Amino acid sequence: MLDTPTLVKAAWNPLEGDAAPSRDELRHWYELMHLGRLLDSKAPNYLKQAIGWSYHAPCAGHDGIQLAAGLAFRAGQDFLFPYYRDMMTCLAAGLSAEEILLNGISKATDVASGGRHMSNHFAKPSIGIQNVSSLTGNHTQHAVGLARAVKYYQRDAIVFCSQGESSLSEGYCSESINGADREQLPVVFVVQDNGYGISVPKHDQSANDYICDNFSGYSNLKIIKCDGLDLLDSMRAVAEAVAYIRTGQGPAMVYAMCVRIGSHSNSDRHELYRDDAERAEAKAKDPLPRFRAYCLAHGLTEEELTGIEAANQAHYLAAHDQAMAAPNPDPATIHDFVIPEGWVSAQFPDGTHHAEGTPVSVITALNQTLKEEFRANPDTFIWGQDMANKEKGGIFNVSKGMQQEFGEKRVFNAPIAEDFIVGTANGFSRLDDKIRVVVEGAEFADYIWPAAEQIVECSHDYWRSNGQFAPNVTIRLASGGYIGGGLYHSQNVEGWLTTLPGIRVVVPAFADDAAGLLRTALRSRGTTLYLEPKFLYNAKMAQAVVPPDFAVPFGKARVRREGTDLTILAYGTPVHFALEAAAKLEKEGKSAEVIDLRSLSPLDTGAIIKSVKKTHRVLIAHEDKVFGGFGGELAAICASECFVWLDAPVERVGSEFTPVGFNRILERAILPNADKVLAAARKVLAF
């Protein structure tokens, strides 16, 4: 693989009064700036030839600040979250020309994603350049989470987070900057202001011409403005930001004024909203000829500069030839790296036991398991809303006593910002694969929607990075009704969550499974959505004996009751309704088998098929709405995989297609119960 010209980190320090950079530094910086511009200008040609690079956001006009940020980054030591326009930043930070081309034309050897992610999303995790999604500015959450980990583990590292000015309009960017300010974290927010968010002018984004002024009231954030067209002024600003962060006082924001010389991307036509005069003015501010003139005025010769330009052209052509010869992604690999394999206990491989002892509640099982895992792994952390203040341990006391035992640096409250809670967990886990983060994603599952985009982000990080990063995060959510909670306190969300490949979704019905699934989640790589039926927290019917180190593997159902005439598939609270209905059916001479799914994704399809082949009839019981609920997927599996064994239509019972009402009379009318399950079972058996 061809290398970018040897990286020469800046010795010139604008903060120490150095008069000017050396000739060698100027040569190297011009070499990088010219090569970056050459690659930038070649990118559209690949699309025209149908070779690739179907998305390209040019960096021309951002050259000064991008080169300065890339030069400040220490490969293998710092961390960089670039955005889609940061080609020059990534080149200066350590990507080779060939690696940039491999990303652009989506080859299998692309170090960012192996061709899985969009072009112009440059990354190289092996040296600290992170794989960032297309969601505008959402990587600020990950940068702040990673900076939190850097501070906790006392690493000599700085987190650079680069973005456009329009991303500051996103609420999660404000959450991130607020969090970094409050926690005084070592992160530099590099904001590149070119005046437009695609075609939306800046004055439609903010009342302040400098959007960084929106954050001027933050106590610990140092805001530094610079001319992003000017390399030396940009280097001054970045150096000032790094120096401030090294004091430990807080984060910094470098706000660089740039221009966008071309369109936003190759799918945009800027002549539709920028007149001839404005486009000409932007082109006249081009940083490349500006820096070339500076080099000539400070000792470099025309011959030297033309020599650099010729060498870069040859370097590009060689990189192009190698990139074109690289293999394309293999379609047979599409199922690789969807989600890491879950941990499996050697002692409890099927997630069952016959232990005797004193039964405990679901709350107790969860609390004990969390404490046991925190003792076993000192790199385990938990944070969330209202869950670690003095003697209070969450609104349901699941985390009670944890802060007292493990300290405020491992167990702490988060702001009431669900997106920030989940996003920083993703970022925190990036520092080291041994780290495990548990979050109370929201006080109730119904409040998780602000974090939906971060859950989606977690769901494809592993696949998108071609297996280079998986967020080791367990997201706990108190789910479901039967508590008189009404809207935002009684809904179910698994019907949406199970549509996302790349995350696990588990729902226990008994205390032993609650402990076992949580232990497996905390010992596994990847992201698990752990739904806790709040009605069962202290319910006597959910109590169970929990043997030491009990664990339940993902994707393994449990037969709660053997039967021959009817299979009832259930999870969570309705498992108990199914067992009650099965007991009544037995008195009527009918034998119902109750399958506690426990794990919805991955799903134990084999256990379902095995049971249906035996009983020939299926009833699906879940708490969520029937229409659009997870039961529809279960019914489809039964229909497609078990059709020849079915003697009756598949029946479903669940909530009505309404929100869950607050008044108990309304709640009872809406949610399923044992009587509704029994009536549905009789209907199937009578067919």
Image (cartoon, rainbow, N blue to C red):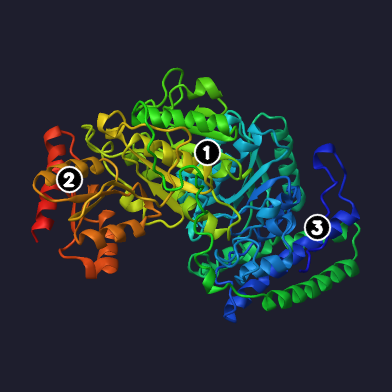
**Crowd rating for badge 3 (residues with CA inside 10 Å; few <14, some 14–19, many 20+):** many
Which amino acid is tagged 3? Trp
Quick one: which residue is furthest to the top in this view?
Answer: 391
Structural distance between the alpha carbons of marks 1 and 2: 39 Å
Q: Quick one: 70 or 494, which is closer to the camera? A: 494
Q: Which element type, helix, strand or loop, lies under badge 1?
A: strand
Secondary structure beneath label 3: helix
Please name the residue shown 82% across and 49% down the image: 10
Image location (x, y in percent) of residue 592 = 19, 50
**Which is nearer the N-term, disc 3 or disc 2?**
3
- Please name whichever residue, 318 or 471, is drawn nearer the observer in this view of the structure: 471
Image side of residue 531 versus residue 198, left or right? left
Res. 91 image quadrant: bottom right
The residue carrying mark 3 is 29
Q: Return the disc, 1 or 3, that comes first in the chain's sequence.
A: 3
State the residue in front, 652 or 143: 652
Label 3–label 2 contact, CB within 8 A? no
- Which corner quadrant holds the C terminus? bottom left
Residue 327 marker: none
Mark 2 lies on a secondary structure that is: helix
Give percent across and percent down for residue 128.
68, 50
Check disc 1 and give the amino acid type.
Answer: Val
The residue wearing badge 2 is 582
CB atoms at circles 1 and 3 under 8 Å apart? no
Q: Mark 1 points at which residue?
A: 437
Q: Residue at x 8, y 47 (%)?
A: 588
Residue type, numbered disc 2: Ala
